[in-house]
Image: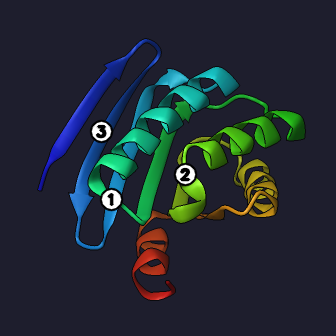
Amino acid sequence: MEKVVYREPGFRLEIEDQPGYLRAQVSEGQDSPALSLAYWTLLGDECRRRGVRKMLVIEDLEPCEVTDAEFQALFADMVGMGFQNVTVAFVPMRASLQTNERGSLLGVEFGLDLMVFSDESYAVRWLRFSH
């Protein structure tokens, strides 16, 4: 299984193949709309390169407040990156689950197949068995 590590300004992103999905963990930084766009852009590139249709994203960043408008801008960019063809299970390790659930509902309005989980094991089961 191929593992790739990106050390970018403001974050570290580890990506590795798992049976049936791609696992990504972003850490070592302070979240912001610009940082989120940067790591989702890298993830989009990896999904296209590997032909991935399912992805688990573990976000372990210092949280920030995100407005609905900032979520909407990110999701519009994600659609442009091809994420409407990728099922995403998202696990925020430190950020508010409620904020990310609100964001995921907005993502669905953009045509994204995105679900937020409080636990990696539940996210993996959802990716493996519900799609």
Amino acid type, residue under disc 3 in the picture? Glu
Whole-angstrom CA distance, mark 1 to mark 2, is 11 Å
SS type, badge 1 = loop
> Residue 51 got which mark?
1
Q: Which circle, 3 or 2, is nearer the viewer?
A: 2
Q: Which residue is mark 3?
A: 14
Q: Identify the residue at horizontal 28%, vertical 53% (top origin).
A: 50
Label 1 neighbour load within 10 Å: few <14, some 14-19, many 20+: few
Question: Dot 2, crowdedness within 10 Å: few (<14), some or many (≥20)?
Answer: some
Residue 82's disc number: 2
The tag earlier along the polypeptide, 3 or 2, is: 3
Residue 90 rendering spot, x and y as whole percentages:
55, 56
Q: Are marks 3 and 1 in contact (CB under 8 Å)?
A: no
For the N terminus, which image quadrant?
A: bottom left
Of residues 109 and 94, the one nearer the viewer is 109
* Callout count: 3
Q: Earlier in the sequence, mark 1 or mark 2?
A: 1
Image quarter of residue 105? bottom right
